[in-house]
Amino acid sequence: MNSAFAWLFDPEHWSGPSGFPARILEHLTYTGIAVLIAAAIAVPLGAVIGHTGKGTFLVAGLSNGLRALPELGLLTLLVLLTWVGLLPLVISLVILAIPPILAGTYSGVRNVDRAAVDAAHGMGMRGPTVLARVELPNALPLIIGGLRAATLQVIATATIAAYVSLGGLGRFVIDGNNAGAGSPDGYPQMAAGAIAVAVLALLMEGLLELVERLVVSPGVRNQSRARRAVRLRRRPTTDLVENPT
Amino acid sequence: MIEFQAVTKQYPDGTVAVDNLDLAVEDGGITVFVGPSGCGKTTSLRMINRMIDPTGGRILLDGKDIRESDPPLLRRGIGYVIQHAGLFPHRTVLDNVATVPLLTGQSRRAARSRAGELLELVGLPAKLAKRYPAQLSGGQQQRVGVARALAADPPVLLMDEPFSAVDPIVRDDLQQQLLRLQSELDKTIVFVTHDIDEAIKLGDRVAVFRVGGRLAQYDDPSALLARPADDFVSSFVGRDRGYRALGFLDAGGVPVGPVATVRAGEQATADQLDDGWAVAVDAENRPLGWVSAELLSTMDGSVNADRLVSGGSLFEVDSSAGTTAGSLRNALDAALSSPSAVGIAIDGDGAVVGGVTADTVLAALADARRAGEVPA
Amino acid sequence: MNIDWPWPWLPANTDDIAEATGEHLYLALLPVLVGLLVSIPLGWAASRWRVARGILVPLAGVLYTIPSLALITLVPLVLGTQIIDPLNVQVPLAVYTIALLVRSVSDALRAVPSEVTAAATAVGYRPLHRFLTVELPLAVPVIVAGLRVAVVSAMSLTAVGALVGIGGLGQLITEGFLRNNGVELVAAIVLIVVIALIIDALLLLVGRIATPWTRTAKGVNS
């Protein structure tokens, strides 16, 4: 265990293009690009499905089907299908990030108090106005919850990028594994990389929770908790269960 | 008999839910614990089956301290009915009712056949037996709750606001049924409610609790209405208590006078009316409604049963025995709610036997008061 | 890169594929079963005591957040196992299952209406008997929902073990990648997805059969 921490805190491993800062930056870059693209697709789609109630099967189908898809298989397959560089990685990460954001947005919009939506229509708002002024603000906690789940999923999966010769924190695990068990750059390097990934994921989780608190109005936050409890009592939903990563 | 002896329940935060309660619940009959929220009535009830244990004093069930009994065994011998029924959602109606017999070791077949009898007893059709609780209405669920509590034929039945979550019409129905069941089964029932009307309607004895867990008065309902022990009880018993107290006075002294009747579908003239009104009756002399002189003049001489003025409440007298079955309250209400100011008196078959007026009811009340039948 | 589609590979290697599938199932399902058995008492404790909930639920959240490759890599460090021990994959999968189910079980038990538990106590159930025959059955729908997520996720996460040399269908993925063998790669992916969805459907079915009361039409007479 000491050797793992020794490797982790060795100043030599904290500089240069293959040091921790560079790898962390790569990791976050992959994550940021993928989550942004996924959000640009899934938030509007989820909002429209939630608002109109059409295409609900898509949400459930995607979240069930994609949960079973092995990320490693998807990524390696895309790499082998002749694309080179970042593209296969970004595509597979986006595919993985879409279901949680879609489910979060859909459920958020769908679960807005029907009385509030009725009242908005009653005041003369048109559909898009209702969506923008009433449904989306109330859906914010679940949308952010979806983004959070997606981000963590992507951070975890981006670790696998190293296997297809890309960067990120997974590099240390893969390189360590390739160096062999006896080598000083073997398991200590693997463990150091794993610790770094775990810490990064936990920090990001904490950061996103903070963002959620700052962005969501307290009234809506409490409401959504209460509603969640009520929903659980009525019937369990699998839509909102996050995947382990 | 259930005896509370100096029973106190104090919570760790210092709240006293029940304060030094002394009370004896006699065998048979319905004893109602009533009071505002926070008065300790439910806590007192739940101490009887040891859902809650007191912090002071003791409770005796048929002379035996309940602390000597193992709680689950004690509870299997005491029926318990609660608000929302508390049915097991994952079991059919029949299996819900069979719960206690199964717990006490009866065979599944025997327990289910017993459960079937009980469903019938509480007035539920046999076809509901295979349903799940979520498929029943609130009133039906509550009936199943009562059946479940009665399944092991316990001598004591505890009922904790059982009817407060159902609508007024269903509640009235359930109350009537409880009274009917009790007349057949003669259990010792302890019934908790916050509704004083329900307490007076159901209770043979009523214990009024005040906030802080103290017993304010323990009496039979008519005495409670007539002689509230203090200002708290009198304000809790509420407005109209004088009027409601009439419900406990026999209307035997009220003279039933003649009332004009006309038969529906037959010819009638204004001469047949008395003071401008007559009761329209059917072939069996049962009341259908009232006809006024003005109304009759638009009916081409024949009484049209479809165009009557609807009547007020009816006052039932047992004409064969020559005594009245109703109370002064029934009699007065019949008079006050009638469009002609004459209350219709009917016999056990529902046929009109005469009329009563508010004046005669009040006169009868004054006579009873003079004779000392009504406490001043 | 180029990808080859050597179709004859498939019939020639059915034995190896079957063996890898069996290994994959063993690697994925045993931890889920263990996780289920552990999470019921833990979930019960979390539903019962505020302190237990205050510790278990956030801990479950933290463990759930740690990426699988990291957790797999760190098991030898924590448990002292060999680097290619199957436990390195199975322990993390059990941990994920527990992390997921502790919360589900606890929420489901807390969602049992208080009047139902009160009624069960009042008719004379003893605590353990009441838990097993009233509260746990009522929690089954939520537990099954959590279990479905856990099983399906375990099926796909097991593949990550191949990156640190642990078997199962994930090894066909890494092998297919290294040899540019599209058939091997796709066969492994399809097997993982299809088997996961079949198990998911089976769990759904078993859950439905075990909880007939959840399928009743509401409010027939109300």
Image (cartoon, rainbow, N blue to C red):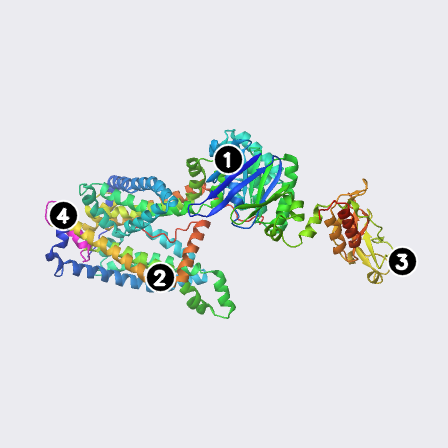
Q: CA distance from mark 3 to mark 4?
A: 116 Å
Mark 2, residues whose alpha carbon is within 10 Å: few (<14), some, or many (≥20)?
many
- The x, y position of residue A187, in whole percent, is 14, 47
Residue shown at the point (43%, 55%) measured from the top left: A226
Q: Nearer the viewer, residue A212 or A77?
A: A212
The amino acid type, in three-letter code, at marker 3 is Asp
Q: CA distance from mark 1 to mark 3?
A: 69 Å
Q: Which mark is residue A42?
A: 2
Q: Which residue is mark 4?
A: A2
Are dots 4 and 2 in contact, CB under 8 Å?
no
Circles 4 and 2 on the same subunit: yes
Are dots 2 and 3 in contact, CB under 8 Å?
no
Q: Which residue is mark 3?
A: B271
Please, which chain is the residue tagged with disc 4 on? A
The range drawn in magenta is: A165-184
Q: Nearer the viewer, residue C30 or B181?
A: B181
Q: Which residue is mark 1?
A: B75
Precedes in sequence: disc 1 or disc 3? 1
> SS class of the residue under badge 1?
helix
Mark 4, residues whose alpha carbon is within 10 Å: few (<14), some, or many (≥20)?
few
Q: Closer to the camera: disc 1 or disc 4?
A: 1
In the image, is residue B218 above or below residue A87?
above
The amino acid type, in three-letter code, at marker 1 is Arg
> SS class of the residue under badge 4?
helix
Q: CA distance from mark 2 to mark 3?
A: 86 Å
| Left or right side of A79 for C38 | right
The amino acid type, in three-letter code, at marker 4 is Asn
> SS class of the residue under badge 3?
helix
